[in-house]
């Protein structure tokens, strides 16, 4: 007898088709049968050792977070309710060009410092890996949800070239090509870039194109955080479309937004650009989070020249009064490339977390608010925070536009990604709320998407991008990565004031046929594993 029958569920199967009522039978981590209500009439219904009454609940494929920053959280936090409670059963990590494999001893220390604001310093993690394969093996010891990995191009450059703003030599480029090939062979699904973050931003298009050719040869995709989401946003999107066309590489645009005042109402221009490329045969997808503010580190706003050489050189420049004034000029008057070519508006920069608890008074306030409280300039406050907290502060950047968010999420190649940074005293609520916020706010309350369409965005479209043949749909033979939610009550509990509140209306979540959430509570199950690129 099979393990479980989920009885009388309203199945939204991830395809975009209309829902239907059915009994779904799960055994050995797979969906073994689906008996629709019409077929069950007048015949014996399926039985199993356990029966779950799903009356009034929607059964859907587990959600796929196409842009996650859980690279260390998956290892340090077995509970990981931030994602499990949302119905997420697979995260794509290694984002924005910076993560922890492949590395050597030198670059591991540099990368840990550079992205401490994203993932914490990692003092509570045993970094017993160096290669992509070793990192994936570490995940395979057991994690809360599944994870796929993108090779981080900035980390590659740190390893092969260093943190200097210069072109790679042919030998260095060949080294990076080999690293990409090795990472793909070991199971990575593609490559990411952070082209407003050092050192990845120092790569010219020709260098990126060569690496993308290797990615494409293994059936992977390129996922860039491109060079501007502000003053040069449309040109930056065009650059990525052209680059991947030249490399013949599939493109997935990370957190595809149009931010800052210069881009208010301009989402249709982006969508026209994408539609034209798709009509010409391009393979493009994108992800977004359903909120207007962004989230990053405070140091990321600095001009690229100030970040050259790595974290220690940044601190030296900030400590020098003359150089610090030069940085301020670029930030406040010229428009730093780290701030997307737009002069910084300190009233939009909210400190969401610090590494040093003694700086907690800054958290939850904008830089401008803290400056006024102290009778100081905003730059004085920002500079002090960067130096005292050794580049660790994270920020919310209130620069988005609701009409752009809604327009982009309707697009036919859209998928969901939380971009969830779990660090800080007051992280962005998207880390805990992205997927239920789509279902509760944008489906039930606003009707921006139908339920069936939204679930397809969050499941099968993402699985197709990842080339996963047995995930993303409720189908016989597919893996039992499933979520049960109440469409009348599902919603994000997280808010800007209380960002770690768990969602409502998601009682059950299964990974590989095992309950990681049951009756609204996190179990002790660690059924997640690495999801590796399928051989071509």
Image: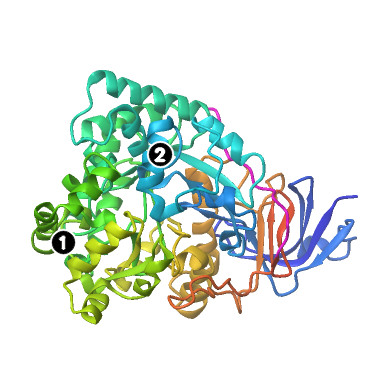
> In this image, 233 relative to 417: left or right?
left
Choose top left, top right, bottom left or bottom right for residue 265: bottom left
> In this image, 59 relative to 172: left or right?
right
Give the labeled residue for mark 2.
109
175 w.r.t. 437: above or below: above
Residue drawn where x is 19% and y is 36% of the image? 165
Residue 22 image point, x, y percent: 74, 63
Please provide the residue range marked out in magenta.
522-536
Asked whether 530 falls inside the magenta stretch, the response is yes
- Tag 1, which secondary structure? loop
Q: Nearer the viewer, mark 2 or mark 1?
A: 2
440 w.r.t. 6: above or below: below
Residue drawn where x is 46% and y is 35% of the image? 101
Residue 261 image point, x, y percent: 19, 69
Count of numbered badges drawn on the protein: 2
- Measure the C-alpha gap from mark 2 to mark 1: 31 Å
Asked whether 198 falls inside the magenta stretch, the response is no
123 w.r.t. 492: above or below: above
Q: Main secondary structure of the magenta part?
A: loop
Residue 423 image point, x, y percent: 46, 60
Q: Classify 10 Å Cα crowding around label 1: few (below 14), some (14-19), many (20 and above).
A: many
Residue 430 image point, x, y percent: 45, 66
In contact (CB < 8 Å): disc 2 and disc 1 = no
Give the labeled residue for mark 1.
342
Q: Classify 10 Å Cα crowding around label 2: few (below 14), some (14-19), many (20 and above).
A: few
Lower position in the chain sequence, tag 2 or tag 1: 2
Q: Nearer the viewer, residue 508 or 500?
A: 500
């Amino acid at each position: 007898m099979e393990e479980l029958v989920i009885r009388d569920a309203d199945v939204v199967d991830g395809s975009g088709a209309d829902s239907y009522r059915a009994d779904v039978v799960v055994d050995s981590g797979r969906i073994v049968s689906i008996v629709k209500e019409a077929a069950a009439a007048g015949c014996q219904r399926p039985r199993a050792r356990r029966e779950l009454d799903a009356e009034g609940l929607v059964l859907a494929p587990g959600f796929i977070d196409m842009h996650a920053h859980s690279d260390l959280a998956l290892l340090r936090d077995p509970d990981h309710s931030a994602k499990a409670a949302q119905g997420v059963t697979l995260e794509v990590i290694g984002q924005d060009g910076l993560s922890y494999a492949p590395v050597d001893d030198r670059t591991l220390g540099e990368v840990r410092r550079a992205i401490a604001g994203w993932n914490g310093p990692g003092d509570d993690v045993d970094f017993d890996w160096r290669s992509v394969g070793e990192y994936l093996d570490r995940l395979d010891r057991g994690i809360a949800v599944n994870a796929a990995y993108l090779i981080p191009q900035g980390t590659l450059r740190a390893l092969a070239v260093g943190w200097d703003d210069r072109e790679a030599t042919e030998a260095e480029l060949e080294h990076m090509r080999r690293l990409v090939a090795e990472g793909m062979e070991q199971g990575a699904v593609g490559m990411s870039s952070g082209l407003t973050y050092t050192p990845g931003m120092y790569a010219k298009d020709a260098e990126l194109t060569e690496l993308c050719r290797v990615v494409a040869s293994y059936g992977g995709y390129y996922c860039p955080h491109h060079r501007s989401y502000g003053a040069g946003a449309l040109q930056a999107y065009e650059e990525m479309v052209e680059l991947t066309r030249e490399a013949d590489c599939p493109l997935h645009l990370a957190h595809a937004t149009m931010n800052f005042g210069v881009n208010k109402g301009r989402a249709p221009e982006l969508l026209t650009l994408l539609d034209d490329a798709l009509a010409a045969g391009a393979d493009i997808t994108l992800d977004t989070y359903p909120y207007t503010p962004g989230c990053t580190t405070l140091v990321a706003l600095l001009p690229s020249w100030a970040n050259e050489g790595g974290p220690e050189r940044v601190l030296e420049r900030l400590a020098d009064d003359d150089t610090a004034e030069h940085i301020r000029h670029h930030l406040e008057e010229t428009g730093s490339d780290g701030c997307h070519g737009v002069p910084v508006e300190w009233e939009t920069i909210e400190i969401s977390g610090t590494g040093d608890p003694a700086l907690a008074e800054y958290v939850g306030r904008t830089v401008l608010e803290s400056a006024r409280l102290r009778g100081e300039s905003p730059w004085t406050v920002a500079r002090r925070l960067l130096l005292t907290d050794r580049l660790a502060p994270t920020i919310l950047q209130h620069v988005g536009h609701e009409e752009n968010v809604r327009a982009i999420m309707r697009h036919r190649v859209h998928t969901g990604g939380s971009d969830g940074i779990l660090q800080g005293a007051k992280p962005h609520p998207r880390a805990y709320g992205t997927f239920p916020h789509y279902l509760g706010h944008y489906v039930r309350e606003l009707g921006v998407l139908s339920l069936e369409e939204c679930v397809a965005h969050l499941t099968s479209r993402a699985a197709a991008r990842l080339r996963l043949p047995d995930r993303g749909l409720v189908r016989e033979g597919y893996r039992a990565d499933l979520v049960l939610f109440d469409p009348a009550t599902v919603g994000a509990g997280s808010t800007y004031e209380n960002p770690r509140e768990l969602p409502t209306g998601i009682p059950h979540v299964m990974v590989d046929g095992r309950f990681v959430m049951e009756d609204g509570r996190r179990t002790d199950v660690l059924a997640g594993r690495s999801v590796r690129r399928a051989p071509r």
